Amino acid sequence: MSGFHFARFAPSSLATQASIWFTGICLLGSLSAVGQSVKAASVSASAPGKTVVRKIDGKILGADISFLPQLEDRGIKFQDKGVQKDAIEILKDHGFNYVRLRIFNNPAADSGYSPKRGFCDLEHTKQMAARAKKAGLKLLLDFHYSDTWADPQKQFKPSAWANLSGAQLNQAVHDYTRDVLLALKAQGTTPDMVQVGNEINHGMIWPDGDVQQADSLAKFDALADLLKAGISAVHEVAPKTLVMLHIALGGQNLHSVTWLDRIRARNVPFDVIGESYYPKWHGTIPELRNNLTDLAKRYPQDVVVVEYSERKAEVNDAAFSLPNNKGKGTFIWEPLNTWEAIFDKQGKSNERILVYDEISKKYKIK
């Protein structure tokens, strides 16, 4: 199952991967021009609006467990201390209080995330949301706005929207977001937080919202319109639900600031800054801490590390130790079966799960 995760970062070799990542980041910053002038220019060009930024209530110890239905479909039963239980209940027993679920437009399509099976579609998401809420956990819903994985190296337009652009595409984003949230609300599982896009530092729904090309400043206008369309649907259906914007720049402060300044200059309303942190792509723990600290000081939004896997204790220490009470927590990416999983391949919890007992106690997670 870990192959799914490596696929989402694209090329076959790490060297190629790093090269593409670096090239993309350089393109993002290239129009910012000379030295540190990028920061002042992006802010002064258009002052951000007076939108109200809502705050996260409490602290988050979260997990993206979207693979769970697929694991259960393979017959895996989860155990902790020799007792078989629902994996969600086991996570709760070790201090987790939030679940993150990704959703794709049409994952059952031949070119989708789960051909013919449709894992991570609306119906699977509704079932998982009900399980999470029944267990007493909060829910973060992650819209990829694609039939398959969306990340900095690929943001494929959903097949149903292939011929849409401009106002029609914006309307499709709004209507799809609205319809998903209405379905969840109808069964009593309204998300507590919503990601409008996944790892969107290079934009989303390419080519329309692709901001890594030479005309990226103009494309930022298009990206802002797409974001506003999705966010407006969240506000309409679930006005108490928080909105997160998610970028994959955990240790890259200059590029994080450049992107966020451009989005804020276009008056995109959002409540939470989400960052991914994987050491291979996003730097050292000190670089992560430096970036998160600067974001916490610079912007009114709360800050969350919404994807990570390795260096569990260090990442959580960085995320929970930010100034101005802005560091609200973390979401580990797919801890049930990938990379440094906290369960073995037979579904038995291992020693890594104990780290979360310590984290939840240290930071008084409720």
Image (cartoon, helix red, strand yellow):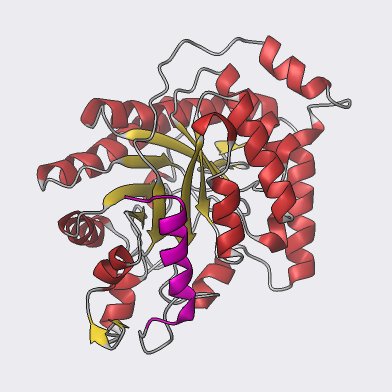
Q: Residue at (33%, 32%) from the top-left corner? A: 174
Residue at the right extreme, as displayed: 34
Q: Position of residue 14 (x, y in %)?
A: 74, 70
Look at the image and tell me whether residue 105 can be seen. yes
Residue 10 left/right relative to 341 = right
Q: Residue at (32%, 54%) from the top-left corner? A: 97
Total numbered circles? 0
Quadrant for residue 116, please give it. Answer: bottom left
Look at the image and tell me whether residue 213 can be seen. no
Q: Residue at (19%, 61%) from the top-left corner? A: 131
- Magenta span has 351? yes
Q: Position of residue 360 (x, y in %)?
A: 41, 57
Q: Position of residue 176 (x, y in %)?
A: 29, 40
Q: Position of residue 321 (x, y in %)?
A: 57, 43
Quadrant for residue 48, please give it. Answer: top right
Q: Main secondary structure of the magenta part?
A: helix
Residue at the left extreme, as displayed: 187
Q: Residue at (29%, 67%) from the top-left corner? A: 93
Residue 196 left/right relative to 47 = left
Question: Which residues fall within the magenta stretch?
Answer: 349-366
Question: Observer-nearest residue: 196 or 106?
Answer: 196
Residue 307 left/right relative to 139 = right
- Magenta span has 106? no
Question: Observer-nearest residue: 272 or 94?
Answer: 94
Question: Observer-nearest residue: 88 or 40?
Answer: 88
